[in-house]
Image (cartoon, helix red, strand yellow):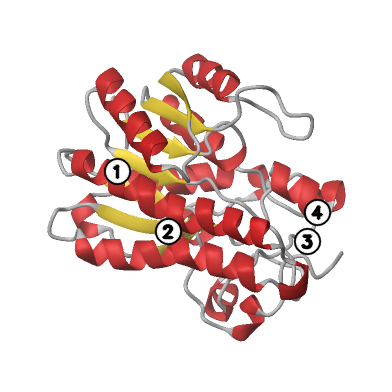
Amino acid sequence: MSLAGKTFFISGASRGIGLAIALRAARDGANVAVVAKTVEPHPKLPGTIFSAAEDIEKAGGRALPLVCDIRFEDQVFDAVEKTVAAFGGIDVCVNNASAISLTPTLKTDMKRYDLMNGINGRGTFLCSKATIPHLKRSSNPHILTLSPPLDIDAKWFAPHVAYTIAKYTMSLCTLGMAEEFRQDGIAVNSLWPLTTIDTAAVRNLLGGETVARVSRKPEIIADAAYVILNRPSRDCTGNFFIDEEVLRSEGVEDFSIYAHDPDAVLAPDFFIPDESFARTPTKLLSGRAGSHH
């Protein structure tokens, strides 16, 4: 497996899961367009598009830092054009950028609702749409979206309707576009973690160090993405992958390298269907993600 010479367009690549996927591809010598908003360091969030680009080049890849708010059509198309001008095409679009607010209906202000739906749903649709004409020219084109399986169960909606709608819109893009572009040979898949992942969002919004300790590192998502993006695009589309299941299918059995604390019982993520829990030998805290704190 190798992603050498492949060009990635990754939204939200300045930190967390987006950066981890970029670094894994960079180790093979991939080209990465770092598509994100962070130009100046943020007091609570690590990384900028420039620090991410530096890390990608140190890892062995080529990087193009691009300031872009994916809610805006002109900015996205401009970023795509710059990526193609720099690297000659696009092979992979990773829809990673996402906004979160785990608030119930009466506590969700419309500005936050619009932000989540603008970045998550509209942004995923827009980045996919803008890259597809270039993906059609790739030898193994993939769209990979960081969004959950479509488990339409009221328990996932009731606590935070607005956030769930925004995340499921991303997954609906996968469902529809996989079929729409099947004849073009473009793989369109979603990837979601079995457990919570230690990112800035988890530390800032979901309970800080306590939850980070029962979470896995972003590298598990990066390694699962690496497996998916190396698969032949015509044979691998329309899937809602779970990170651990992808890696187990490749023979991985030891997941302790991804844990902050190998002895901790891990927290399950939101939106994981019961059958996925039933299939995993990994011991998880009971109840849905976040219910333990």
Who's the residue at 43% across and 26% down the image? 26
Q: Residue at label 2?
A: 190
Which mark is first along the chain, 4 or 3?
4
Choose between 40 and 92: the one closer to the eye.
Answer: 40
Picture layout, residue 217 above or below residue 115: above
SS at mark 4 in the image: helix
Work out which residue is located at the far bottom of the displayed protein and give it.
Answer: 154
Which mark is first along the chain, 3 or 2?
2
| Eye-nearest disc, 1 or 2 | 1
Q: Is residue 195 visible?
A: no
Choose between 221 and 11: the one closer to the eye.
Answer: 11
Q: Residue at label 3?
A: 265
| Picture quarter with the N terminus | top left
Q: Residue at label 4?
A: 211
Q: Amino acid at mark 1?
A: Ala
Choose between 126 and 57: the one closer to the eye.
Answer: 126
Q: Residue at label 1?
A: 130
Q: Is residue 54 visible?
A: yes
SS at mark 1 in the image: helix
* Separation of marks 3 and 4 at Cα, in angstroms: 11 Å
Indicate the position of residue 78 as horizontal and vertical percent values: 34, 30
